[in-house]
Amino acid sequence: MNIVSANENPGDTAELNPMNEFREGVELLKNEYPEKALVRLRRAHECDKHNPYFMSFLGLSIARAQRKWDQASELCEMAVQLKPKEVQFYLNLGEVYAASGRRERALDKLDDGLRLFGEDARLRQARNKVQNRRNPILPFFGRAHFLNRELGRLRHRALKRAFFESRTRQVAAPRIEVSGERRQIRRLVGPDQVFKQVHGTRYNLSLPL
């Protein structure tokens, strides 16, 4: 049901559809715009404060945009209690706890999800990610401190760059077989090109072992 609500401009009114607000908010979260997502998801939640989907994603957006961990975790916890058989709620809650530095709490919640849903690939991947998180560079500030977050991003980029540089040096020229003919490419290619899937062409791309 549509609800009439005040627009962002004072004095204007518009038809507000909470499901549209929710869908747009989730899409903004996926595209890493948590501040914009927060506006949409808060509107949806204001329309229906008992909807567990609105609760969970609002909590996630609060964690990403504002780092208000207690408020975010409370909303995500309530969503799990209202609808315990929704795997995404455990993923959202686990992310909130992990981002706030409560790694053991995040692991406990993800384990709850694994016990309930079995070996769900998304839950397992999220758990492995939390378990393998590196220690903060400045432990005396805490994981959520802005210096640790920025230094962590720099460390991640440096490690990622070093990985791809080492892979590029190790990758030899692949062989291409076209209709029984074998040709050698006389140039080095990066790992992204080596593993790229090519559709609609009759050749096999194989790396020498």
Image (tube, grey):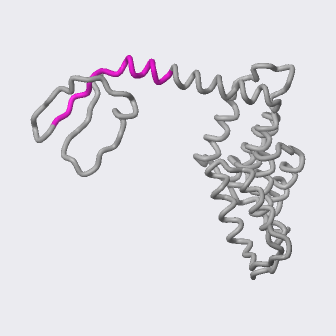
Q: Please state if 81 lies on the left or on the right of 113 as rendered.
A: right
x, y percentage for residue 152?
A: 70, 26
Please tell me which residue is depicted at 35% across the width and 34% down the height of the picture.
Answer: 193
Does 167 lie within the magenta span? yes
Q: Quadrant of the C terminus?
A: top left
| The furthest residue to the bottom | 1
Above or below — where is 209 with respect to 114? above
x, y percentage for residue 172?
A: 30, 21
Please tell me which residue is depicted at 81% across the width and 32% down the height of the picture.
Answer: 144
x, y percentage for residue 168?
A: 39, 22
Does 175 lie within the magenta span? yes
Q: Which residues are magenta?
A: 163-177
Above or below — where is 4 with respect to 44? below
Please tell me which residue is depicted at 67% across the width and 58% down the height of the picture.
Answer: 26
Q: How many marks?
A: 0
Above or below — where is 13 with respect to 203? below
Q: Closest to the observer: 5 or 114?
A: 5
